[in-house]
Amino acid sequence: MPAELVDEHRWLEQLAGRWRLAFKSPTGSGDYDSCGTWEETVRTLGGTWAICEAIGAIQDGSSATNILSIGFDPSRKCYVGSFVSSDMTNLWVYEGALDETGKVLTLDSEGPDFENTGRTARYQDIMTIQDVDRRNFSSRVQNADGTWKPIMSCDYTRI
């Protein structure tokens, strides 16, 4: 039985296409020197899922592939998804929502605390639609005091 598409599924369609990525430092002070050229191809699976595959250079100069999947679960009334990377062993599982503007999708996850071995931390990946040809993807981790620390930001431009 085909999935019944809702407006939240249609929101995902704007991600489809080819994108060039430009990483910025967490403070926004400029591009990362260690990140080379990255490109992402996004396709949808029947309109229900956006599958985003990014390929590029990592800090040691080798190549990495990242795959992000995002869908909407009408029964749970939230966006769901996952992220895997060829340079990580963790499967990141997402649950999130759009803000009231319909431009910002915040995806919550839990994963390894990279500063405290053996512990986990809360993370948010935030996708902001700027216009039809530009978007931003940023990540942050929650500190012990509940505040959020930016860890990555990336500008996407449609190719």
Image: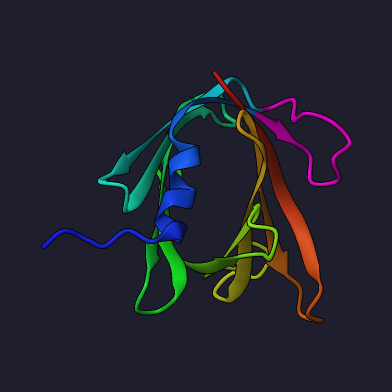
Residue 82 in sight? no
**Residue sitting at 44 percent across and 76 percent down?**
77
Q: How is the image coloured?
A: rainbow
Residue 115, how many percent across, how many down? 68, 64
Nearest the viewer among 31 and 69 is 69
Reply yes or no: does residue 9 show up in magenta: no
| Residue 155 found in image quarter | top right
20 shown above or below 2: above
Which part of the image, by quadrant, shows the C terminus? top right
The residue closer to the viewer here, 131 or 151, is: 131
Q: Please tell me which residue is depicted at 43% across the width and 50% down the height of the picture.
A: 10
Query: Taking 138 as reference, is 2 above or below it?
Result: below
Judge whether 138 appears above or below 154 on screen: below
Q: Nearer the viewer, residue 60 or 130?
A: 130
Question: In the image, is 133 to the left or to the right of 32?
Answer: left
- Compared with residue 142, is residue 54 higher up or lower down, i.e. above or below? above
Q: Residue at x 64, y 27 (%)?
A: 35
Q: Quadrant of residue 41?
A: top left
Judge whether residue 97 can be spotted in this image: yes
Secondary structure mostly taken by the magenta-highlighted segment of the chain: loop
In magenta stretch: residue 26: yes
Magenta stretch: give its range: 22-34
Q: Is residue 31 left or right of residue 138?
A: right
In the image, farthest residue toward the right? 29
76 with respect to 97 (left or right): left
Left or right for 49, reference 56: left
* Of residues 24 and 102, the one drawn nearer to the viewer in this rendering: 102
Image coordinates of residue 105 in percent, x first then y, are 60, 58
On the image, the x and y values in percent for residue 18 come to 47, 24
| Picture coordinates of residue 78, whole percent (x, y) | 47, 71
Q: Residue at x 62, y 28 (%)?
A: 133
User: Residue pushed farthest left?
Assistant: 1
